[in-house]
Amino acid sequence: MSDVLVVADHRRGELRDVSYELLTAGRELADALGGDLHAAVISGDVERFADELNRSGVDHCYALADGEEFDHNVYQAGVERLLAHTGADAVVMPNSVNGLDYAPAVAESHDLPLVTDAIDIAYDDGLVVTREMYGSKVETTVAVEGDRFALTIREGEWPAADGTGDAEVETLEFEPPESGARVKGFEEVGGGDVDISEAEVLVSVGRGIEEEENLELVETLADALGATLSSSRPIVDNGWLPKNRQVGQSGKVVTPEVYIAVGISGAVQHVAGMKGAETIVAINTDPNAPIFDIADYGIVGDLFDVVPELIEEFQ
Ligand code: FAD
């Protein structure tokens, strides 16, 4: 019997969706291991976050390091404090920029085997984790020996836990460690404060747009739909949109309700970032473009004809 600890992720004053997905994965593991599920928030507005995190399936909920910014040392020490307090043997963290910062340090200091970027888990006499390799071209399974492990999960792969929980929120005493480096603040990189991973509707543009000045066309479509503009990698590589708009393996993982791919072929590295969208619409001149393999609705046609018609319709 082993307990499981999950560590929530938050950014700019909001819990990120992956926090609730972590609860689902954590509950699955806790049931398999016959233990309790402990959910924790470290840093930021911890009491509000802990209340939001307290969803059904959570047995114990913790808050610590109130008001701190994200900081490697605070998180490493915070998770160590939580592992000592809860007695959990398994810790599940987000495979986010923050999670990947502290997860290896936690695994190392607790001598836990670490498996990153899980897209699925199974438990049968031991944990078996599914991961993708070689730019999502192959799936591999990793068997973990014993019931002690650290795991990071990919965003958008588990359903979010819902339903209000009735765990009591416990605020833990915590002294941030002495450190030579402290995070003093947070500044957005160029591209503004757009977080495409939080958008409900994305209009995503690819190389089919041909020229930078043609971007205005898809921007107008995004505006007509109240959607956010994202793109494939070549658009970012050309410097036409900032990096925070890129969807895919080396960009962001997005799970919007609607994803409209305009002039995007559907390369595996792009699909890795958007296949979790609820409804996928693709506009492409090539009927054999791989994007149509995963699209719910496909329009085989020239985007310069199709998009103006859609704009007219939606406006
Ligand atoms: P293309 O593949 O060139 O496709 C353009 C599409 O537009 C074609 O299907 C074409 O039929 C269609 N088209 C052309 N004209 C029109 C028109 N007038 N109307 C309608 N359709 C038209 N890519 C990402 O997107 N995100 C990533 O994170 C990412 N990471 C990568 C990481 C690595 C390690 C590597 C090696 C590659 C990565 N890539 C990534 C690049 C990826 O392999 C593809 O090259 C890229 O996704 C292709 O972008 P695209 O679909 O816009 O362009």
Image (tube, rainbow, N blue to C red):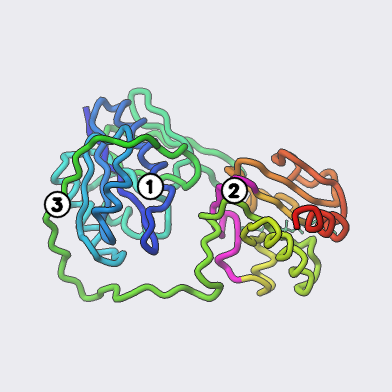
Asked whether the beta carbons under mark 1 and mark 3 sit within 8 Å of each other, the answer is no
> Residue 19 shows which numbered tag?
1
Query: 177 or 217: which is nearer to us?
Result: 217
* The residue positioned farthest toward the front in the image shown: 315
User: x, y (%) of residue 164?
Assistant: 33, 36
- The answer to which image quadrant residue 31 occupies is top left
The reply to whether residue 113 is in sight is no
Q: Residue at x 79, y 60 (%)?
A: 208
Q: Is mark 2 within 8 Å of ligand 1?
A: yes
Q: Is residue 175 magenta?
A: no
What amino acid is found at the position of numbered circle 1 in the picture? Ser
Question: Which residue has dot 2 on it?
Answer: 272
Residue type marked 3:
Leu
Q: For mark 3, what is the residue?
A: 172
| Label 2 element class | helix
> Which quadrant contains ligand 1?
bottom right
Q: Give the alpha-carbon distance from disc 2 to disc 3, as whole Å.
A: 38 Å
Above/below status of 88 relative to 209: above
Give the magenta range. Answer: 242-258
The secondary structure making up most of the magenta span is loop
Q: Amino acid at mark 2?
A: Ala
Judge whether 37 appears above or below 227 on screen. above
Residue 79: give x, y in percent of width and height: 23, 52
Q: Are marks 2 and 1 in contact (CB under 8 Å)?
A: no
Of tags 2 and 1, the one toward the viewer is: 1
Quadrant showing the N terminus: top left
